Image (tube, helix red, strand yellow):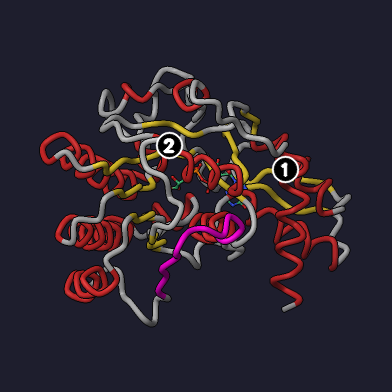
Amino acid sequence: MVFDLAGKSVFIAGHNGMVGGAVLRLLKQRGDVRLITASRRQLDLRDEHAVGAFFTNHRPDACVLAAARVGGIIANSANKVGFLYDNLRLQNAVIGAARASDTERLLFLGSSCIYPKLADQPIREDSLLTGPLEPTNDAYAIAKIAGLKLCEFLNREEGRAYISAQPCNLYGPGDNYHPTTSHVIPGLIRRFHEAKHSRASETFIWGTGTPLREFLYVDDLAKALVFLLENYKDPGLINVGSGEEISIGDLAGLVAEAVGYEGVLKLDPSKPDGTPRKLMDSSKIRSYGWRSRTSLQEGLRHAYADYLSVIEA
Ligand code: GFB
């Protein structure tokens, strides 16, 4: 182990989000880490002065940068200024403050959408910047590429153990269930749940149903992130995926099953498909012994339970 988190202080930027929340749960369970968090009201992570002062005050040993402006295919394509600018501001503020206060380790969350739209599959880490991006999420991807490159350069030039991990499409507790800004799994959970309750004989899936996606349950990702924080300090990227892909049409069938919706699923091809396929090569992280443990069926049951707890709260 290169960096034992036991007894260390860790700032989780974005602990109220799905990924940050999963890392918080995992580190709380572990019990030997001093956790530092700040809500959005307490700290605007885009405000570099406020973030600098926060780091000077708390002096975390490590930081998990899980905060970001995120959203599904429609949110990403409709608000490129926000997705690029807010993410650049936020990540620059946090990475800059970590550097200024000599935070020993930092883990930056990237995304599989950083890779070229038509990258060879499964997508290896070295395919970064070898071709044009998928236009429905280019703004978000460019911000993420800037962040992971900043970590890489700080690592190479200044010897800082600042690393970045690239997860595939994620889902699980703490997701955003908004009908238009959400990603596919929470979007379908909500739509199918509402269709079940209104006894609608049919409901719809965006796009053609043919795109392929790789999904990872967020608690499995959290285990990978904590592992990387303690064991990985290379400047190079590292993919974190389940290794399994599924078409959106087949995924919709599994979500309908988890929710208990028995109506007809129709396609809405007026909505964008996005990239045709996005399966990552995660052999690097698997060579360290990590693998995803939660099957899609099991994860979808937990995700639906989370949705029910949110609407019942
Ligand atoms: O999850 P999603 O929005 O993200 O869409 P991306 C995945 C696929 O599901 C697309 C289809 O082909 C959608 O057309 N889909 C079907 C739906 N029904 C729905 C629905 O009700 N809601 C949504 N959202 N999609 C994201 C990027 O791309 O990937 C993010 O926008 C991020 O930036 C993430 O990088 C990993 O996989 O297309």
Dividing the picture into quadrants, the one containing residue 145 is top left
**On the picture, is 273 further left or further right than 66?**
right
* Callout 2 secondary element: helix
How crowded pointer 1 is (Cα within 10 Å; few <14, some 14-19, many 20+) is rated as: many
| Tag 1 residue | 252
Above or below residue 38? Residue 270 is above
Among all residues in the image, which is located at the extreme bottom?
41
In percent of width and height, residue 3 lies at 37, 42
Above or below residue 273? Residue 36 is below
Does the segment drawn in magenta span residue 189? no
Q: CA distance from mark 1 to mark 2?
A: 21 Å
Q: Which residues are magenta?
A: 28-38
Circles 1 and 2 in contact, beta carbons < 8 Å: no
How crowded pointer 2 is (Cα within 10 Å; few <14, some 14-19, many 20+) is rated as: many
Residue 162 visible, this orientation: yes
Residue in the picture at 26% in, 41% down: 161
Dividing the picture into quadrants, the one containing residue 208 is top right
> Which one is nearer the viewer's eye here, 77 or 107?
107
Residue in the picture at 53% in, 56% down: 27
Name the kind of residue labelled 2 in the image.
Ser
**On the picture, is 146 further left or further right than 198?**
left
Label of residue 112 in the image: 2
Among all residues in the image, which is located at the extreme left?
157
Q: Quadrant of the C terminus?
A: bottom right
In percent of width and height, residue 76 lies at 41, 53
Q: Is mark 1 within 8 Å of ligand 1?
A: yes
Q: Is mark 2 within 8 Å of ligand 1?
A: yes
> Which one is nearer the viewer's eye here, 219 or 56?
56
